Image (cartoon, rainbow, N blue to C red):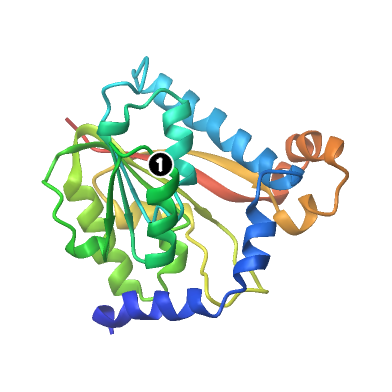
Amino acid sequence: MTEQEPDAVKARYARRDAAADEARYSLYGNAAALQAQQERLRAMVRTWADHGWPSLGSRRMLEVGCGSGGNLQDLLRLGATPACLTGIELLPARAALARRLLPKDVTLLEEDAVHANISPASQDAVLAFTLFSSLLDAGFRHQMAQVLWRWVAPGGGVLVYDFVVDNPGNPDVRRVPLQELQALFPKAHLQSHRLTLAPPIARRLPAWMVAPASQLLRPLRTHRLTWAVKPR
């Protein structure tokens, strides 16, 4: 049932090996993770610059499922103002770590995003990074998409970074193809970029080969960064 999905997400994350996750996604000494982050940031900057945003300084931006705050830290490095940023995280341990790492002016909410008290049309951008792939209940996916869309101001958008292929080694995630994103945000204009060399391949390559391999092996990219723009 849709109402049970947040508890199911908590249970799925509780089964994961926290130490293995930290090693897999740490940027230090991890060429595959570092390349994926840098490639994603370049695509974000290009997308928002093409959208007519010369800077992020005054943009109100919110991330759902902010984890320990890594993406919010990236927004700060790109010039976002701490007081304009909000993160929502369902898992208490991750929310606590984000609070320790982020500036105090960043708003952090520890709760189910569906019930968060966010004003309609109050955000220029809402980030959903590997969020929808973690929601296995189709009804809850649609409910979450409607909530995120309601928060976005006209002329803003939802920025989705997620899997477009299934991971046979992880039954706790499900791919989110471009066609489904259009169905989740039927009134949006989508701008999308295929990114991220398949991590199992990238992790096996020497560090110096990861970036050129990502360029040469475009059919083996496993994620999309999609900017779903709300009409003015």
Residue 142 shows up from this direction:
yes
Q: Residue at x 45, y 45 (%)?
A: 101
Instruction: Determine whether, in the image, residue 76 is placed left or right of residue 205.
Output: left
Q: Residue furthest top?
A: 54
Residue 180 shows up from this direction:
no
Q: Residue at x 80, y 39 (%)?
A: 213
Residue nearest the viewer, comparing 64 with 213? 64
Q: Quadrant of the N terminus?
A: bottom left
Q: Quadrant of the C terminus?
A: top left
Residue 228 position by quadrant:
top left
The picture places residue 43, in percent across and down from the top left corner, at 53, 31
The picture places residue 75, in percent across and down from the top left corner, at 43, 33
Mark 1 = which residue?
A: 102
Residue 146 position by quadrant:
bottom left
How crowded is the residue under tag 1: few (<14 C-alpha within 10 Å), some, or many (20+)?
some
Height in image: 170 above or below 25?
A: below
Instruction: Determine whether, in the image, residue 212 is placed left or right of residue 136.
Output: right
Q: Which element carries disc 1, helix, strand or loop? A: loop
The picture places residue 80, in percent across and down from the top left corner, at 36, 27
Q: Amino acid at mark 1?
A: Leu
The picture places residue 206, in percent across and down from the top left corner, at 88, 44
Instruction: Determine whether, in the image, residue 214 is placed left or right of residue 56.
Output: right
Residue nearest the viewer, comparing 118 with 95? 95
Height in image: 211 above or below 28?
A: above
